Image: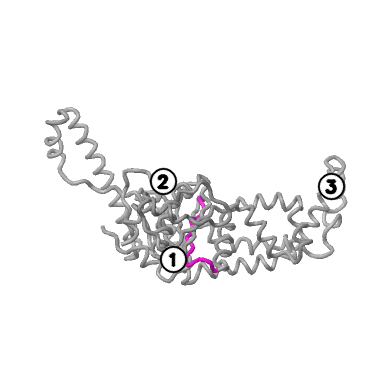
Amino acid sequence: MSNSSDIAALLEGREVCVCAGSGGVGKTTSSAAIAMGMASRGLRVAVLTIDPAKRLANSLGLEELGNEARQVEEKRFTDAGLEMKGELWAMMLDPKRTFDDLIHKFASDEGARDQVLENRIYQQISNAVAGSQEYMAMEKLYELHDEGDYDLLVLDTPPTRNALDFLDAPERLSRFIDSRSLQFFMKPGRSGLKLFGRGGGMVFSVLKRVTGVDLLQDLSEFFNGFADMAEGFRQRSAGVTELLSDDRSLFLIVTSPQHDSIDEAIYFRRRLKERDMPFGGVVVNRMHEAPGGGRDNVEKALTPDLGEALAVRVANNLDDYRALAERDQENVERLEAELDSEPIILVPYLDDDVHDLVGLAQINEYLFE
């Protein structure tokens, strides 16, 4: 099987590229390579990641990334012998910081903003919600797209058990805001001791005496403050869903040729199809390519230089590698049957781990024609 398309053709006219897939298949590296490849063609591109291992920063030659995009200096490409016609920017999302920024955006005034940000309930909840990296990734993606500073945004999706959980994140937030329980808390006049009854009031009173924390007051202030911002969050969630669903965006599935990873890719493709999301194709990383030459010929050719015992070991290793290549080919053929002529781009198993710009350029020899 040969590559049936290239990334540049798939992304022509697109503003968002979402790289989806399970963990451990080279998704972060592929996202960085795609972003660099598109930037080298003259675009202003930003790649976003939540990868805790910080491999993206290392591969781009940056010491660290933060919640604000940083440009990869043109000199880095020149020093690596690469041509960069456009601009490549990168950022590593800070979910807590992103949530705080949303409070800044949706608060009606500085007083309301500070009341929520300084609230102990918010500080606990924001850390908990920030753990839902999927929603914060969608928020940052939408924010950068709305600002319009980049020709293309490439999102390296969070490493989750279900790599498409992030598609449901905006809807989950809307359901939370519209839920009867939250509306109950946010209704005027329903906060305070009346909300919890006499027994609850006594418990909060004891907690206040023991800890010095007026938990009831904190709850009341938080829910009253959040009530003013709920509509902003609701509209934002709708905007994120709309952006990802139309032809401004494109989803690429990144996988490896291993059996379980191919099963995951097939499942992801079906989920995207069910939701009518704009799908571009699949990148299959780390393909083993079947070596040429028969076992007997290899053993015979190596025996004079290596000796019979070592030549036999090399020939055995060659047989093992050929078996891996045949297994990979069979798995990809299953994927090909599922995709029904949709693009599959194959990236071979490289000799060295990709950790710099040169390595990304090597991957792009297969991603881009």
Q: Earlier in the sequence, mark 3 or mark 2?
A: 3
Residue 292: image x %, image y %? 18, 46
Q: Amino acid at mark 2?
A: His
Q: How is the image coloured?
A: one colour
| Left or right placement of residue 66 versus residue 225 in this view | left
Residues at badges 3 and 1 in contact (C-beta under 8 Å)? no
Residue 19 drawn in magenta? no
Q: Image quadrant for the C terminus?
A: bottom left
Residue 203: image x %, image y %? 84, 45
- Disc sitting over residue 204 in the figure: 3
* Vertical arrangement, residue 14 with respect to residue 76, above or below: below
- The residue carrying pointer 1 sits among few (fewer than 14), some (14 to 19) or many (20 or more) residues within 10 Å by Cα, namely some
Q: Residue at x 74, y 51 (%)?
A: 121
Residue 357: image x %, image y %? 40, 51
According to the image, label 1 marks what residue?
43
Which SS class for mark 2? loop
Q: CA distance from mark 3 to mark 1?
A: 57 Å
Predominant SS along the magenta part:
loop
Q: Nearer the viewer, residue 2 or 56?
A: 56
Q: Identify the magenta region.
A: 148-160
According to the image, label 2 marks what residue?
355
